Amino acid sequence: MSDQLNTLSQSSLQDYHDCPRRFELRYLQHLAYPAIETEPALENEKHQQEGEYFHRLVQQHLIGIPAEQVGKLANTPNLQRWWENYLSAKDLMGLRDQSKLYAETTLSAPLGKFRLVAKYDLIAVSGDRVVIYDWKTYRKRPKSDWLNVRWQTRVYRALLVQAGAHLNGGKSFAPEQIEMIYWFADFPNDPARFAYKADQFKRDWDALTKISDEIKTASDFPKTDDTSKCNYCPYRSYCNRGIRAGDAADAELETEAEELFDINFEQIGEIAF
Ligand code: SF4
C-alpha cells in the first residue's frame, strides 16, 4: 500500500468495505471523479451544496447567532424547509440551554499505523450524557438497520470513547454515556438513535484495528463482486461497470463522502502520534 496514506476516516473505511478498488482509486490514486455520479447531475449537485450550506446555518445557530439572523440565509425552498424543521425540533432547540456544545469538531486517535479522523457535526455534553448529532439532508429516510452497520455509526461512537476525554474534564467517556442521533432535515420527527455499550465499543475497535492492518498490508484492491455498488460509483468508466448514472436519491445513501480535505488538521484535538 502507498505509504502516503496516513489517515483513515469513516468515508474511506466505508469505501474499502464497499469496494477495495474504489478505495484505491479515491484515496491512493486520488483520481478525480471521471463520470457524472448520478442523474440528474445538476440537481444532485445543487442538493449537495444546499446540504453543506444547511450544516453551516445550524453551526452558526449553535455558536450563538440568533435564529432570525441565520434564517435570513435560508434562501432556497429546500433550505427554508430544512431550517423551519430544525427550528421546530424541540429536542434540538433545548440544546443551547442545557448542554456544552462542540459544533464541527474533529477528533482523532492512532489506529494501528494510521490516524483515525472524524469530523462531528455536533457533540453535546449534558451532565454525564453525551450525544453525537449528525445532520442529514437525505431525500429518503434510510432504514435504521442500514445506518446501524455503517462505518460512520461505529467510528463516531468508538472514536469519542477513544479521543474525547478533553470534552469530559480529562476522563474518557464510558460507552454507556454515549448516544448517536442522525437527525433528518426532511424527516424531523423520525431521527435514528443509537445507544452504545462496552462490548460494542470493543467489537468496533477490534474491527477497526483489523481493517486498518488489512489496508496497510494490502497489495491488491479488487473490484467488488456486488455490481449494485457500481450503479452510483463515479469510477464506473474505469471498471467497465456501465456508464449510465444511478438515481440521485439512492446514490446519496450509498456514496456520501465526507472528504478529509474538509478537515482542518489544526483543529484535531487530543491524542497525537
Ligand atoms: S465501479 Fe464498481 S468495481 Fe469499480 S470502483 Fe466503483 S464500485 Fe468498485
Image (cartoon, rainbow, N blue to C red):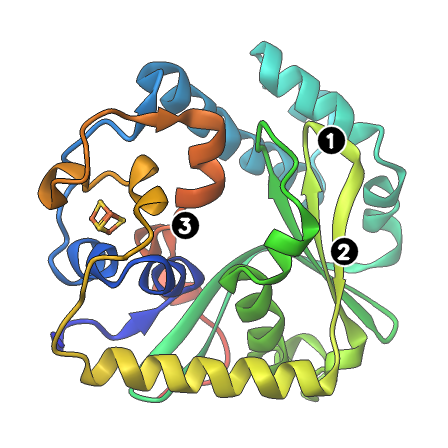
| Among numbered discs 1 and 2, the one appearing first in the sequence | 1
Q: Looking at this view, is 37 or 110 the one in front?
A: 37
Q: How packed is label 1: few (under 14 Cα within 10 Å), some, or many (20 or more)?
A: some
Q: Where is residue 11 drawn, in percent x and y?
A: 39, 57
Secondary structure under badge 1? strand
Q: Are marks 1 and 2 in contact (CB under 8 Å)?
A: no
Circle 2 sits on which residue? 193
Secondary structure under badge 2? strand
**Residue 217 sits in quarter:** bottom left
Q: Where is residue 270 drawn, in percent x and y?
A: 50, 80
Q: What distance separates the C-alpha of mark 1 from that of mark 2? A: 14 Å
Q: Residue at x 24, y 38 (%)?
A: 234
Q: For this view, does 34 lie left or right of residue 155?
A: left
Q: For this view, does 17 lie left or right of residue 221?
A: right
Q: Residue at x 69, y 18 (%)?
A: 81
Q: What distance separates the C-alpha of mark 3 from that of mark 1? A: 21 Å
Q: Looking at this view, is 185 or 249 the one in front?
A: 249
> In what quadrant of the picture does the N terminus appear?
bottom left
| Among numbered discs 3 and 2, the one appearing first in the sequence | 2
> Disc 3 marks which amino acid?
Glu
Answer yes or no: is residue 256 visible. no
Q: Are marks 3 and 1 in contact (CB under 8 Å)?
A: no
Circle 1 sits on which residue? 187
Q: Residue at x 29, y 58 (%)?
A: 19
Note whether 233 is above or below 195 in the view shown.
Answer: above
**Residue 46 sits in quarter:** top left
Secondary structure under badge 3? loop
Q: What distance separates the C-alpha of mark 3 from that of mark 2? A: 21 Å
Q: Is mark 3 within 8 Å of ligand 1?
A: no
Circle 3 sits on which residue? 258
